[in-house]
Each structure stands twice: as C-alpha cells, then as structure tokens.
Image: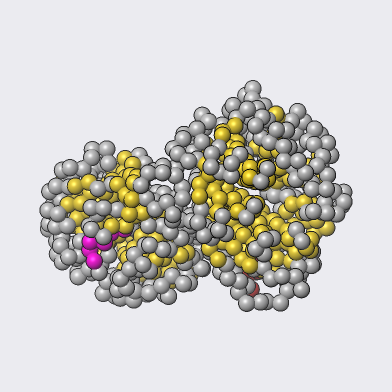
Amino acid sequence: MKSAIIGLGLTVALCAVAAPESWTPCGWGGGGFYWCAAFHPTQDGVIYMAGDVNGVYKSEDHGRNWRIVNHGLANYGVYSLAVNRCHPDTVYAATQDGLCKSVDAGKHWELLPRTGPKELRLTGERKKSIRAVAVDPSDSNVVYVASPAGKVFKSTDGGRTWSVVYEEPVNGTIYSVAVAAKQPSLVLAATETSGVLISEDAGRTWRAGSTPKKVASVAIAESDANIIFAACFTDGVWKSTDQGRTWTVVSEGLAKDCSILEVAISPANPSDVCVIGKADWNGRFYASHDGGLTWIESSQLAVDHAGNPTVLQGGNSAKTRLSAPTNLAVNPHNPQELFISANWRPCWSDDGGRTWTERDRGADISCVHDIRFHGGRAYVAAMDEGAFYSDDNGNRWHQIAPNKHDPSLNGHCWRIAATDQQGVDRIIATFSPWWQKYPGRVVISEDAGKSYQVVTNGLPDYVPKANTMWGIGHAHALAVDPRDARIVYLGMDGDPKGGNAGGGIFKSEDGGRAWRQLPHQPGSRRVFYGLVVDPTNSRRLYWGACGVGGGLYRSDDGGESWQLVFKNETWVFNVLVTGDGTVYCPGRNLWRSADHGKSWKQLTKFSGNGIIVGLECDPENAKRLWHSVTFWNDSAQGGVFKTNDGGVTWQEITGDLPYRKPLILRFNPSTKELWAGGVGLHRLTQPSDK
C-alpha cells in the first residue's frame, strides 16, 4: 500500500491499513491481441502468454484456463517472453517500459535496471519484438536481448548489467535472438537490415548469413546446431545445414502472399518444422515433416464460445480461421503440443498442428468501458468487441451485439443502459464502427438482448474529427433519465468543421429511436464519460468536458442552455450525481458540491500525474464512495480508493487487482459487490455498513 501512495502522491488522510483486497475475475477470454507465448521447460502443461494491454497470463492445464500474473510489471504491453531452462521459475517479459523479470514463476515481477525506453531500450514493442529475449540454456546468468533500436545486448549477471555485443550499422530493428540448446556459444539474431547474424563465440564476433535483408526470427535445431531455419517475412522460409554459412529457400507450398513471422523446430526431430504467417488479418500455420521441402497448411480452429463469447471474428460457427498469429511455441515435453498466440483467438494443438482448438478462458483482454446492473443481470460494453450480458454474476457471458460480422457495426461499444419495459430488459448501447465510413450509432434491444436494431436517425452521418479525445468523435457518453426512460441523452466529442455540425450532446424523446442535436452546446464538446441526469430533477443535466474550455457544465432546462459551474479542473472525464443531488466532479482530484455546482469542496490531494476516471457511490449510503486513478498510458500505475465518511479519509483497496487503473467502477447493491472494468473485469465484495 505504501508504494502505491507514494507513486500517486496521495496526501489525504488514510484509514488504517487492512489486509490486501482480493478481487475475483468475472470477465471472459479472447477478443484482443496476444503477442507472445512460451512453455515451461520442466513442468508439463504450464504455458505463459502475454498481450498488449493486460500483461502476462499463465495456464497450468495446457491452456484450458488462464489467470493474470502481472503483479509488479512495469507496463501492461508485453511483446516477448522467455523462460530460463536452468531455473525454470525465472521468466523474462519484454514490456514497453523495459525488461521485467520474475523469479517465482510469474507471481511477482521487477523492472530490471536501465532497461527502459529512454535508457538502454531493452523494450518489447509492437511488431518489432518477435522473440526478443533468449537465455543461455547452460548458464542462467547469461541473457541476450534484441533491441528495437538495432542492438543486441548481453548480460552475465541475470539482467542487472548489460553490454552491447552487436549494433546495426544502419537504422533497423532486431526482431529476434536465439541461442543453441547444446552449443550455447552459438547465438543468432534476426534483423531488419542485415539478415541473419551468427556469432560462434557468445556474441564477441558476428558474421552475416546470405539470407534476405529482413528476417523476422530464427530457430536452431536442438539435436544438430548446424540446422537453422529463418522466417523471412514475404521472402518465405530459408534453411541452412552448415551453421549459417550457406542458405537455401524452402518455401514450396507456402502461399505467395503470406508473410512468415516465426519458425519452430521440433526438439525430437529436426525434420519436423512449423511456421506461422499472415496475409492481412488472415493467419496461416504450416507444418513440414521433411525438413522444409514441402509444407502442409492447417489454419482452421475450433471455437470456444463459452470461454470467448465474442462473435466478430468467426461468427457463431463452430470453426473459424486463425487470425494474425504472433508467436509459435513448442512444448519441450511433447513436441506434438503447440501453442499459437494470435489476434482474437489464441489456440492449441496436441497433434503437431493438424488440428487447433481455441484456448483463452480467463485470459481477459477486453477493454471495458461500461458496466450496468439491472434485473439480476450484469451488462458490459467493450471496446472492439461489443455489448454483452451475464445472468450468473459474470461466470458466463453472452453477446448482445453484434451477433454476426457486420462492417457497419463491428467496432467499439462505449456505453450501455438497461431499463424495465413491461417486465423485460430494454437495452440501449452506443457504438462506433472501426470503418470510418460508418459514423457512430445506437443499438437498441427490446427483448433482453435476443435481437437488436441499429439506429442512426438524427445522429451525424459523418465522423467528427476536430477537438476529439482520440482523433475521431466517439459516442462515449450516454444517460437515461431515471424518471422517464423515454428521455435519453448521448454525448459525442468533436467540434463543427468543414460544414458539419460536429458532435456534442444529442437528445431522444422516444427511447433512442430518433435523435436531435441540441441547438445550444456546452463550452467544450470534448467529452468522455461525463454526462448525467440529476435524479432529483430531470431537467438538470451535467456535462464534463476536457481540454480547452474544459470543466463541468450544468443545464437546468433539459440541455437547451448551459453554464460553466466548475473550472478548477479542465480535464473532467466523468461526473457523478447521487440520489440526493450531490455532485462529484473528478479531475486530478475529486470535488464535491452540495448546491448543484455553486460551491465546491476538494476531497483528495493527489500530486502526481494520474487522473480520476472511475467514480461510484453506494445508493444506500451516500457517504460511501469509490474512485479510481488512471494514467493514460500502458504503465502499471493507478489505484482504487474508498471512503466511508464522505471523503474525509480514504483507503486504498487496489489489492491484487491485476489492472490497477480501471476506467469504470460500478456497485451492485443486490450482491454488495464493487465491479472494476478497464482491461478485464473484476469484482470485490464490500462489507456491510456497521
């Protein structure tokens, strides 16, 4: 707890330190980008996998179930993994903030000294780090790292200090590094501009192989270090049988449009080789049983809809195609067992790649932007994936929309709300498709998610781009009048430009079927979550805005006119109004107004660079609130805080929450649980009032 307080610069009074809070995962797996995987060298069934937004995952049952193991990671973006053969509980993770190391099988991590992007740049980076870390199989202290800056680094003390053993003469990434299993003085590097580089003296000297200039990865046969394969992007697969002195192309049977990213050799038989590649989003797996002379493709996988309920990639079919694979791992205990990290659906094979099964249960990578509870259900809106519901408290999830591949809808779901309609849940959610020719839209379900309709009536037929949060306007905000569910407000960021009327606040008086842009807008339209209807007065609205003109705006006439009521904070990502009309405005600190914005009291004193986004109040106890501090990068900073006395004192309850900076906090009064959503979903039981 102490380190988190120091990191955030918290100086408000704190309650007594309690036992660490233990959060329960309640999300799903799949639906995002997993970038790397590695098998445990001695414990059969153990696999590590990592992704771009939630760090490292671990499975102990051959990938059937996963849990997040990112405690202490410097950054949640992880692009390469390596396990130490000599000390198999030692794992390395190349993150965007530097190289992290665990000595207890992923339970805890530490950032190794001087490995950050502004220092040595021993970082993992998207599309630049394919197999960036290799450990000497005979000496656990010797570690090699391929840097995106075009250098190979070597450590002889387990990563405490480093020396450069190779540097590219021209700018270019080094994608991968490999060490021979039984001849550890043989080290290879795969580069962007110099092809395959070979060192036979543990990195002291290097020579170039006669391969294409751009090479993604290399593999050395365990039983014969003379045999080397190179994955050469669009130049296919190359092979050497004399330790890299001469090379031949072995790409017969590979698709011409396939970019080959990684190659792996069976430790049992060097003639058994497999590769992964992709053409656009379509992934391909090939296996060869004759040393690369011929290749057989097997790129279909069985879908696990229970573990991954998303239907955008693969639809509702039992099988789909491999999508954008990133890493290929071989089980050293059983070379027939393979694992592919990939986009959306990572997969596993136990027959050498002839058949594949999706395996990502518990590997939660979903970027959650809203959580709501209604009628015994939990509803979630997720970026990239869509809208979902669970009727068993998060044990199993079902997709509401999209329910098929639909370019006009596939994309980001931002906000969701559910109301009662004659005993049936009526659902409304906001979307912005990936393809910008389809502007923002609303999805409505009148039958608790069994079917839905897409609404664009009255919404912009363009995508606003001026003065937006993330480059284009998104419908980040949604508020339903708690007294009349027919009245709905939508917030979309973006100023008028080039003849279009921009985003701003839109109003519907028929439950979201038709919309109109309000004629008078707040002083800033750069909105995130900050839109709410005062439950004590349906005519009173609040709008939190960011950047120039940012602050908190209030309307007393249903959105027809606005006035700025708070400008101490100019980046207001959210706003909360409790049942008695008390207003909470977050920014770098949290503020409260008991008179609709006329006067304000500061409730926290953070001095760091974090910003409060998640905000929630117990509807049965106005003095019990929660907030989360977020940092707008991939770093593992942030925290969740709770007060039982209206903000006089605060207690940090981040505990073992894997994603420390959730964007959404929602309290479920029926279960007495606080839910946190950011990357992934977790819930925490809250004690009853005493």
Residue 58 occupies which quadrant of the picture?
A: bottom left
Q: Which part of the image, by quadrant, shows the C terminus? A: bottom right
- The residue lying furthest to the front in this view is 422
Q: Which of these two is toward me, 340 or 186?
A: 340
Q: Residue at x 17, y 65 (%)?
A: 268
User: Is residue 609 among the parts visible in the rendering?
Assistant: no
Across and down, in percent, residue 46 comes to: 35, 68
Bounds of the magenta segment: 334-340
Q: Which of these two is toward me, 122 or 566?
A: 566
User: Is residue 347 among the parts visible in the rendering?
Assistant: yes
Q: Using residue 122 as the reference point, say whether residue 578 is left or right of it.
A: right
Residue 190 occupies which quadrant of the picture?
A: bottom left
Q: Residue at x 27, y 71 (%)?
A: 137
Q: Which part of the image, by quadrant, shows the N terminus? A: bottom right
Q: Residue at x 61, y 39 (%)?
A: 446
Q: Which of these two is toward me, 16 or 84?
A: 16
Across and down, in percent, residue 177 comes to: 30, 59
Q: Using residue 587 as the reference point, say whether residue 207 is left or right of it.
A: left
